[in-house]
Amino acid sequence: MSQRPTLADVASAAGVSVSTASLAFSGAGPIAEATKQRVLDAAAGLDYAGPNPLGRQLRSGRSGIVGVVVGDALRRSFREPVSVQLLDGLVDTISPLGLGVLLIPGSLEPGAPAVDPLVESAAMDVAVLIWGGTLDDPTLQALQRRGIPLVVVEGQDLPGIVTVGIEDRDGVADIARHLTDLGHERIATVTLPFGPDRRSGLADTERLGQITWSIAQRRLDGLRDAGVTPTAVYETPASLVEQGKTAAHALLSGPPETRPTAVVGQSDLLASGVVLGARELGLRVPQDVSVAGFDGLDLPWLAPDVLTTVAQPIAEKGAAVGRAIEALLAGGTPADEVLPVELRLGTTTGPAPRA
Amino acid sequence: MSQRPTLADVASAAGVSVSTASLAFSGAGPIAEATKQRVLDAAAGLDYAGPNPLGRQLRSGRSGIVGVVVGDALRRSFREPVSVQLLDGLVDTISPLGLGVLLIPGSLEPGAPAVDPLVESAAMDVAVLIWGGTLDDPTLQALQRRGIPLVVVEGQDLPGIVTVGIEDRDGVADIARHLTDLGHERIATVTLPFGPDRRSGLADTERLGQITWSIAQRRLDGLRDAGVTPTAVYETPASLVEQGKTAAHALLSGPPETRPTAVVGQSDLLASGVVLGARELGLRVPQDVSVAGFDGLDLPWLAPDVLTTVAQPIAEKGAAVGRAIEALLAGGTPADEVLPVELRLGTTTGPAPRA
DNA sequence: CGGATCGATCGAATCGATTCGAACCGGACG
DNA sequence: CGTCCGGTTCGAATCGATTCGATCGATCCG
């Protein structure tokens, strides 16, 4: 009898039937106060800590779990403050509903199976894909085959799948206009990864046609929307400060006459790396080169500089995902949401240097 | 019949019994290749994506879920890279075992219930507490009452609970000796939070007696082990760069004759904030003041400086937690683990300035 | 040619709870 | 005194799989 007690044990100890004991815990259904108390006392006496969730879940068909597929590798995602803050907002929203977040690694290292075993066989009521996913993404396909409702963040629109995103294309256009208003004509950009191959370096025309992750594409399109054709597009394999630095060295080492006078980073981490890289090259920001980012993080290490950026409501994005989940579980079909962004001027952009 | 198919549907479609169908999926037990194929074909025909995990879990009594109580670490996570990297190492280790990580918020805002609902009623086979937990922690108590095996990271030793930690006390002692060897006599320290009240400011003797989170205590003790009595102890409410900056202003604003010549941060983020704060005050590092940290993160934004620090094997710590979990699930009683740390000299410490 | 053996398949019990309809009880009413 | 009724409690079915012991059929050997 070293087994943990079950509801049946409690019931017999309290001298009631199992169904009555269940009522005492769930509170659903009529039960006399005295009976309820007797059951709870019996439970306390047996060290019974409440109904076994597995039994409840099987019966109800709900696991109370939201699977969150965190990007390409958990490792990178976690260095990615945007994903993490999104997760935070999501947890805040669904925690009161009694839902929990199960972390699911996306595609793993080469050699590993294409999808994490959790994708195939973990119990979950809904799944969230952070950082998009194309229709041919094996993870997405596996989840669809299992019939698990999906919410996709920052992906492309997919038929029959709820999407949550931001107006990033417009935001980048705002930044581009800000820069052209300041007189900049040679504007380069440092991008997020184009796709799972995560290459690094200047992208030529051919490479620009191979963008599969729509987030990089949209933010590039934003520049063009404002009439800006970047003089150079530097693709990075990950949104990291170091990558921004590397990009800065590649973009800003030339002579002042041909060097870009402004650099737009597709994330704040990349942009702050560009600022640091520019400083290493002896360039002053913003006198010699302007730098703008995207996300609206606060980056204490750039002080006293403040990055010009487009702020996105990250926690609110998490909350929007949470609301979509709630609606899906209620049997509804929530509408896609696109959240607004806001241009936030800092000290890293200024008038273009006189030629 | 809009219900999703069950194993019974597949079995009858394939013309076999439920138990045989089960064998076809689980692979446990003898089954003729032809039969197996017939079952799998029937499954494909019905769009059956594999056995329902809830049924399997109830039967086996295992949910395959590891609950990780992340304290407020999630909210600050990009700011608290150590917890995040630990999580990463953990996921890498247990993912191949088919286990998933369920994020559980630790202490919530005041006003919320003392423990997250997930703590009370989520299905999990093991729970991990990051950043310790004292015996009177309600979360810890609730999990123990439920009979869920626990692994505690960086906590104090608790009877009957597996602990994973590092030799941080010795590591800090190494740092202290490094500084005294360099001739430093006035050494101040900037600490992690003392407890859930998270105060901010210089700690007097009384306050020093109120430390409940053992990690701060151990790293203070390390100084004393090396014979160093700090001239000032600055307590921070969170391990953040900004807090380090604030501390620097409080500690380093005095005249050179009484000002500390070295500051030991209990984390790299705090220490890097101290470096930035010192620079703001016009002090040169390390000529005017030496700064050392703890953790061994790479902080690209301090470049070209490299922080002197004590490196801890964070991913390995996650792996150690994973191994402990594996052992617990196998019915064993894994031993506590204490991982080594390593003093790593950078450019932020140097000889004490001449008096 | 009959009995032992082995592999494949099947039936039924089980995991722990929820839930629905039936049964039960005391009191109020006709 | 019999009936009806609202409030409780109970029994049994159910959720979807796993697993053990039994059964069945065919092969192998004496």
Image (tube, coloured by chain):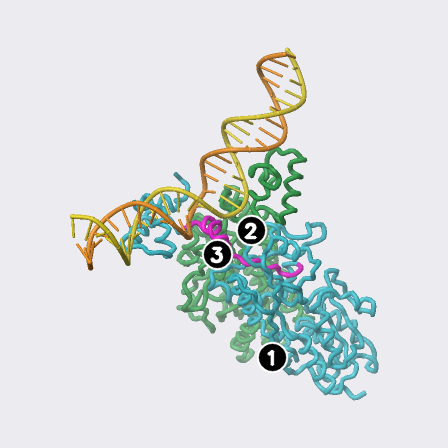
Chain colours: A cyan, B green, C orange, D yellow
Residue on which disc 1 sits: B280
Mark 1 belongs to chain: B
Residue A317 belongs to the span the image colors magenta: no
Give the CA distance from mark 1 to mark 2.
70 Å
How dense is the environment of label 3, judged by Cα within 10 Å: few (below 14), some, or many (20 and up)? many
Q: Are marks 3 and 1 on the same chain?
A: yes
Name the disc covering residue B1, or none: 2
User: Is residue B41 in sight in this rendering?
Assistant: yes
Q: Is residue A327 above or below residue B330?
A: below
* The C terminus of chain A sits in image quarter: bottom right
Magenta stretch, residue numbers: A51-72
Q: Nearer the viewer, residue B231 or A2?
A: A2
Residue on which disc 3 sits: B155
Question: Are the residues flagged by discs 1 and 2 in contact, CB closer than 8 Å?
Answer: no
| Disc on the earlier residue, 2 or 3 | 2
Q: Is residue A195 left or right of residue A79?
A: right
Name the disc covering residue B350, or none: none
Mark 2 belongs to chain: B
Give the CA distance from mark 3 to mark 1.
35 Å
Secondary element at tag 2: loop
Mark 3 belongs to chain: B
Q: Nearer the viewer, residue B279 or B139?
A: B139
Q: Residue at x 43, y 71 (%)?
A: B204
Secondary element at tag 3: loop
Question: Where residue B67 sits in the image (x, y, percent)?
Answer: 51, 54
